[in-house]
Amino acid sequence: MKRHRGMTLVELLIVFTIVGLLVSLVAPSSTKLLDKARAQEEWLVLDRTVDSLAFKAYAEAQYIELSANERMLQWTVGGKPGGALALAHLRFDKPQQVYINPNGLANVGEMSVMQADRQRTLRLNRWLESRR
């Protein structure tokens, strides 16, 4: 019968060292990718929220007021508190007020949003552009 020999302690230490080095190289880039993905997901939630509020204004024939400041988007429906969206990865670089009329149209064409060091523009009234 043939005897099988296991790994020595030195061999195990070398393997663990190599694995540790590989993890230390991969971890920072995967963290950045994860943060980017979370910011993009938050962007999509913000976009859908504003679109759905415009539709709500139209469907309920109500005025909706959006107030954007730092990392918070708040809205009122017909003068009554409607809700809020807290942002973790995006921020509004300056306070912004948007009024959506009962036809679902915003009084401005866009909102300015910062994602890390990148400025992005949230276009409002997009459905008008696609019908021209």
Image: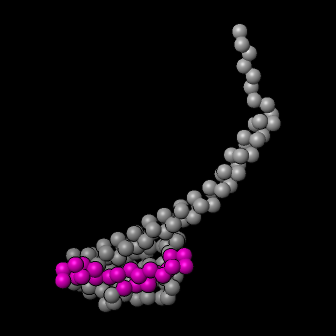
> Which residues are the magenta region?
110-132
Image position of 56 with respect to 34: above or below: below
In the figure, is residue 2 to the left or right of 76?
A: right
Residue positioned 68% across, 55% down in the render: 24
Q: Quadrant of residue 128?
A: bottom left
Residue 83 in the magenta stretch? The answer is no
Q: Position of residue 108 (x, y in %)?
A: 33, 90
On-image quarter of the N terminus: top right
Q: Quadrant of residue 46?
A: bottom left
Query: For the view shown, which residue lies furthest in the left direction?
Result: 132
Residue positioned 43% across, 75% down in the render: 84
Residue positioned 39% across, 69% down in the render: 44
Q: Nearer the viewer, residue 3 or 20?
A: 3
Q: Position of residue 56 (x, y in %)?
A: 27, 75
Q: Position of residue 97 (x, y in %)?
A: 40, 89
How many numbered discs? 0
